[in-house]
Image (cartoon, rainbow, N blue to C red):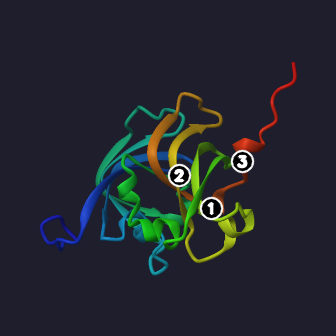
């Protein structure tokens, strides 16, 4: 769908897309369900990124290519970083309903990245529910700091992200962190 023929209900959202080997900076075309609706759409296993600038992870600031449109396989995306909380999508969709949420400060890792931020979850913390319940693969996290494990110069602070729960290796609650012994 080109920019000229897009219905009024669609808009572009600027975002950073991080895969195991590349950082892609560009724009995704979303409907009224925001990034959450696009990434968790089970009818499509890929997505398009417009005005896509590509950089290899080991040199995250050096542009290696630029495309009008690239297609990404969703299961290969670890995280999508956005500048505004509203870009995630409607509150009812992001939180999975209208129930009261509790904020959990968390730290999670994958094989390539570390991610720290605030997870909003209805009720008590339930790791198995977060990681396996429902059909959504991408879960929102707010006020985040992302770093690459082997490339500490790659740091992205973001108001909101959607992380791919199928790529998470571990998740720890920051209030359960043990202080370092002296």
Residues marked 2 and 3 touching at CB (< 8 Å): no
Mark identifier at residue 173: 3
- 60 over 9 or under it: above or below: above
Mark identifier at residue 165: 1
In front: label 2 or label 3: 3
In front: label 1 or label 3: 3
- Residue at the disc numbered 2: 19
Tell me the element at label 1: helix
Label 1 vs label 2: CA separation? Answer: 13 Å
Mark earlier in primary sequence (1, 3): 1
At x 35%, y 43%, the residue is 65
Tell me the element at label 2: loop
51 left or right, relative to 142: left
Camera-nearest residue between 112 and 109: 109
At x 80%, y 30%, the residue is 179
Q: Residue furthest right?
A: 181
Label 1 vs label 3: CA separation? Answer: 16 Å
Camera-nearest residue between 39 and 62: 39
- 38 over 62 or under it: above or below: below
| Rendering coords of residue 73 (x, y %) | 49, 65
Crowding around mark 3 (Cα neighbors within 10 Å: few <14, some 14 to 19, many 20+) is some
Rendered image quadrant of residue 55: top left
Label 2 vs label 3: CA separation? Answer: 24 Å
Residues marked 1 and 3 touching at CB (< 8 Å): no
| Rendering coords of residue 136 (x, y %) | 55, 72
Tell me the element at label 3: strand
Crowding around mark 1 (Cα neighbors within 10 Å: few <14, some 14 to 19, many 20+) is many
Mark earlier in primary sequence (2, 3): 2
- 155 over 68 or under it: above or below: above
| Rendering coords of residue 67 (x, y %) | 30, 51
Q: Residue furthest front?
A: 100
- Number of numbered tags placed on the structure image: 3
């Amino acid at each position: 769908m080109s920019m000229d023929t897009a219905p009024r209900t669609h808009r572009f959202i600027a975002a950073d897309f991080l895969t195991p080997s590349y950082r892609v900076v560009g724009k995704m075309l979303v409907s009224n369900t925001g990034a959450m609706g696009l990434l968790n759409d089970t009818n499509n296993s890929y997505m398009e990124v417009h005005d896509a600038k590509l950089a290899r992870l080991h040199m995250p600031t050096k542009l290696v290519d630029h495309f009008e449109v690239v297609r990404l396989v969703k299961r290969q995306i670890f995280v999508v970083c956005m500048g505004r909380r509203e870009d995630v999508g409607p509150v009812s969709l992001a939180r999975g309903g209208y129930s009261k949420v509790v904020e959990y400060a968390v730290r999670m890792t994958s094989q390539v990245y570390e991610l720290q931020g605030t997870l909003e979850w209805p009720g008590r913390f339930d790791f198995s529910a977060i990681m396996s319940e429902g059909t959504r693969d991408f879960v929102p996290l707010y006020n985040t700091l992302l770093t690459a494990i082997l490339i500490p110069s790659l740091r992205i602070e973001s108001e909101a992200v959607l992380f791919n729960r199928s790529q998470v290796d571990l998740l720890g609650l920051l209030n359960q962190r043990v202080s370092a012994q002296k």
